Image (spheres, grey):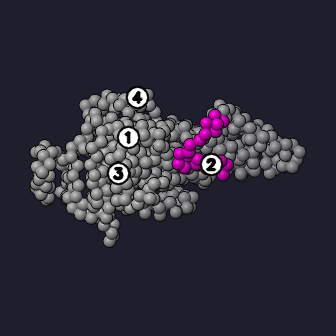
C-alpha cells in the first residue's frame, strides 16, 4: 500500500497529499485490494455547466473498466483528467504510475518510423529491444521501419497500443481507440486488447460509446450521466464472450435504457 | 523578374492517392526531360519571331544572337563588362553570404519567438513591422550608412532572405498539431525532447517552403541591389549594357539570374525530398 501511495499523483499538489493518502488507504482497506486510480469529488466546469460534478471512482489494480456515456457526457474529460492532461479540475485524483494512454486517433508522430514512435520518451535500459518485443506482441514486427502514414488505421492503432504497452502501465487509459476502425478490424482489436490485458494485467479504463464493446471486454461497466457515475454493473461472464449470452443481453437493455435509449428504439 | 514563380505544393495536408495515380506519377517521374519541352518550344517561337522580323533586334535580340553574346562574354574579357563568369562569381558570393546569413538569423529568431511567449512578444511585432518596410526602399539609406561597397548589397540580400524564412518557420512551429504536444506530455517527454522530436520536425515542411520563398526574394533583392553603385557583378554588367544600349547583354544577365534561381530552387526541392521522406508517398 505504501508503495502505491508513494507513486500517486495529485492534481491539487502537496497540500492535499495527506488527505489523498488517507482516502486511498481507506479505499484500499475497504476493498482489501490495491487501487490503480482513485477519484474523489472530481468537478470540471465549462462556464456555468459542470461536465463532471462531484464524481467518485475507484479502479482496482488489474481491473478492466469500461466507461460509457452519451457524447458530451464528460467521458473523455474524465480520462484526460486521469491522464494528467487537464489541470483545470477540482477534487482529488490519485493515480498509480506509470500511466499510458491510447487516443482515439493513434497520434503517431508522422516523421518517426514505427519503432521510433514506440520508443519515444521511453526510459529503459534497452528501449529498442523492448519496443521490438511490443511490436511482436501486436503483430507488427515487419512494419517496424515503416513510416506511420503508410499504415492502415488498424495497424496505426496497434502501434499506439504497443507504444502504451512498453511503458508497463499500472493504468492504461483507452479513449475510444477503436471507434474509427471498421467492424472486422475492431473485432480483432478487441481480441488483441484482451490478450494484452490478460498477459500484462494493467488496470484499464476504456472510454467508449459502444455498449457491445464494453460488454465484450470489461469486468465492470460504468455509465456516466449528469457528471457522475450514474450506473455500475459488474460482468462475470467468462471471456471470450458470446454476444448473445443471456446475461449480456439483459445487461445490454439495461445499459441502453441508462443511456436514454428505450428498448423499442434499440431493437433496430 | 525573370525568376519563375511557383505554387508551394507542399503546404497542404497529406493526400492519399490511388494506385493508378501513383503509378502514373511514377511513370512521369522517370521522364524529367519532359519538363524541358515547353521552354525549348518557347525559345523556338522566339527565334521564329526574330527571323521573320516581327521582333526587331533593337527591342529583343534573337536567341541565337543572345547565345553568341553569352559566348563572347565568357571568352572575351572586355573593358566594359569584364567576363560573364567573373560577374557571376561576384554576384554568387554576394548572394551566398546574404542568403545564408539571412536564413540562419531567421531560423534563430523564429525558434526563439516560436517556442516562448516572451520571445514572441519581443520579436514578432518588430519582425512584422520591419517586414512591411519596402525592402528596396532601404537601399539608399544603406548606401548612406555603409557606403557603396558590398556591405549594403549583402544586407539587402540578407533582409530579402530573412523575412519569408522567419514568417514561415515561425508559423510552422506554431502550427504543429497540439495533439502531438499532448502526446509528448503523456509519454513524459522533457521540454527539450519535445522541441527536438516533435516541434522542430513538425515545423520543417513549412520552414522549407519558407526557404524556397527566401531563395526567390533574396535573388530579387540581389538584382536590384547590384544595379546601384556597383562596379562588378551581374547587375553592374546590366547597368553597363543599358548605357551602351546592348540589350542582348541584358538578356544574358537576366537568363543567368533565372538559372541561378532555378538551380537554387531545385537544391531546396532536393533537400525537401530527403528531409520529408516520411510523407513522400503521399505527395505527387
3 or 4: mark nearer the eye: 3
Say which mark, if any, is on residue A42.
none
Q: Are marks 4 and 2 on the same chain?
A: no
Can residue A84 be spotted in the picture? no
Residue located at (20% from left, 58% from top): A40
Queried whether the magenta region covers residue B24, the answer comes back as yes
Residue B269 lies, with reference to residue A227, above or below; the image says above
- Give the residues in magenta: B1-25
Ranked by sequence position, the earlier of labels 1 and 4 is 4
Residue located at (84% from left, 49% from top): B55
Q: Are marks 1 and 2 on the same chain?
A: no
Residue hosting label 3: A250
4 or 2: mark nearer the eye: 4
Say which mark, if any, is on residue A141.
4
Q: Residues within 10 Å of mark 4 (few under 14, many from 20)?
A: some
Q: Quadrant of the C terminus of chain B?
A: top right
Q: Is residue B74 left or right of residue A28?
A: right
Asked whether the residues under the numbered discs 4 and 2 touch, taking CB atoms below 8 Å apart as contact, a structural biologist would say no
Say which mark, if any, is on residue A242.
1
Q: Which chain does the numbered disc 3 sit on?
A: A
Q: How far apart are the two marked residues, 1 and 2, measured between alpha carbons?
A: 60 Å
The spot of residue A27 in percent (x, y) is 14, 52
Q: Residues within 10 Å of mark 3 (few under 14, many from 20)?
A: few
Residue hosting label 2: B6
The spot of residue B266 in percent (x, y) is 59, 39
Q: How far apart are the two marked residues, 3 and 4, measured between alpha carbons?
A: 41 Å
Q: Which chain does the numbered disc 4 sit on?
A: A
Residue located at (30% from left, 39% from top): A238
Q: Residues within 10 Å of mark 2 (few under 14, many from 20)?
A: few
Ranked by sequence position, the earlier of labels 1 and 3 is 1
The spot of residue B56 in percent (x, y) is 84, 49
The spot of residue B87 in percent (x, y) is 62, 41
Amino acid at each position: 500500500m505504501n508503495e502505491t501511495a508513494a507513486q500517486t499523483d495529485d492534481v491539487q499538489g502537496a497540500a492535499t497529499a495527506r488527505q489523498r493518502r488517507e482516502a486511498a488507504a481507506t479505499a484500499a482497506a475497504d476493498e482489501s485490494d490495491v487501487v490503480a486510480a482513485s477519484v474523489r469529488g472530481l468537478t470540471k466546469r465549462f462556464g456555468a455547466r459542470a461536465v463532471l460534478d462531484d464524481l467518485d471512482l475507484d479502479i482496482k489494480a488489474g481491473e478492466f473498466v469500461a466507461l460509457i456515456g452519451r457524447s458530451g457526457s464528460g467521458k473523455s474529460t474524465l480520462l484526460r483528467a486521469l491522464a494528467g492532461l487537464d489541470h483545470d479540475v477540482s477534487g482529488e485524483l490519485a493515480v498509480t504510475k506509470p500511466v499510458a494512454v491510447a487516443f482515439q486517433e493513434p497520434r503517431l508522430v508522422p516523421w518517426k518510423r514505427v519503432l521510433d514512435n514506440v520508443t519515444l520518451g521511453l526510459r529503459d535500459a534497452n528501449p529498442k529491444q523492448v519496443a521490438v518485443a511490443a511490436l511482436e506482441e501486436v503483430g507488427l514486427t515487419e512494419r517496424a521501419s515503416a513510416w506511420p502514414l503508410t499504415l492502415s488505421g488498424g495497424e496505426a492503432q496497434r502501434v499506439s497500443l504497443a507504444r502504451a504497452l512498453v511503458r508497463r502501465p499500472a493504468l492504461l487509459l483507452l479513449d475510444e481507440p477503436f471507434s474509427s476502425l471498421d467492424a472486422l478490424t475492431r473485432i480483432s482489436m478487441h481480441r488483441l486488447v484482451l490478450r494484452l490485458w490478460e498477459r500484462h494485467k494493467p488496470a484499464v479504463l476504456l472510454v467508449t460509446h459502444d455498449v457491445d464493446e464494453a460488454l465484450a471486454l470489461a469486468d465492470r461497466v460504468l455509465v456516466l450521466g449528469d457528471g457522475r457515475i450514474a450506473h455500475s454493473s459488474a460482468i462475470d461472464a467468462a471471456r471470450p464472450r458470446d454476444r448473445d449470452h443471456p446475461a449480456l443481453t439483459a445487461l445490454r437493455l439495461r445499459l441502453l435504457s441508462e443511456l436514454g435509449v428505450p428498448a423499442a428504439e434499440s431493437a433496430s | 523578374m525573370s525568376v519563375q514563380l511557383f505554387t508551394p505544393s507542399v503546404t497542404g495536408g497529406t493526400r492519399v492517392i490511388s494506385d493508378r495515380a501513383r503509378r502514373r506519377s511514377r511513370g512521369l517521374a522517370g521522364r524529367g526531360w519532359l519538363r524541358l519541352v515547353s521552354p525549348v518550344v518557347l525559345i523556338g517561337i522566339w527565334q521564329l519571331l526574330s527571323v521573320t522580323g516581327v521582333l526587331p533586334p533593337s527591342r529583343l535580340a534573337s536567341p541565337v544572337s543572345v547565345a553568341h553574346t553569352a559566348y563572347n562574354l565568357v571568352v572575351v574579357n572586355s573593358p566594359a563588362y569584364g567576363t560573364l563568369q567573373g560577374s557571376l562569381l561576384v554576384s554568387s558570393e554576394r548572394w551566398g553570404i546574404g542568403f545564408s546569413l539571412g536564413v540562419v538569423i531567421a531560423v534563430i529568431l523564429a525558434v526563439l519567438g516560436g517556442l516562448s511567449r516572451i520571445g514572441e512578444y519581443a520579436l514578432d511585432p518588430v519582425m512584422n513591422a520591419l517586414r512591411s518596410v519596402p525592402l528596396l526602399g532601404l537601399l539608399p539609406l544603406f548606401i548612406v550608412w555603409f557606403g557603396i561597397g558590398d556591405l549594403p548589397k549583402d544586407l539587402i540580400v540578407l533582409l530579402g532572405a530573412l523575412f519569408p524564412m522567419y514568417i514561415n518557420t515561425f508559423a510552422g512551429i506554431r502550427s504543429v498539431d497540439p495533439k502531438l504536444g499532448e502526446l509528448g506530455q503523456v509519454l513524459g517527454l522533457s521540454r527539450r525532447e519535445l522541441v527536438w522530436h516533435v516541434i522542430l520536425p513538425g515545423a520543417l515542411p513549412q520552414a522549407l517552403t519558407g526557404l524556397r520563398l527566401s531563395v526567390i526574394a533574396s535573388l530579387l533583392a540581389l538584382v536590384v541591389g547590384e544595379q546601384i553603385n556597383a562596379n562588378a557583378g551581374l547587375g553592374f554588367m546590366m547597368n553597363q549594357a543599358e548605357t551602351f544600349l546592348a540589350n542582348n547583354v541584358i538578356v544574358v544577365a537576366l537568363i543567368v539570374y533565372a538559372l541561378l534561381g532555378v538551380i537554387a530552387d531545385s537544391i531546396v526541392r532536393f533537400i525537401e525530398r530527403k528531409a520529408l521522406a516520411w510523407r513522400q508517398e503521399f505527395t505527387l
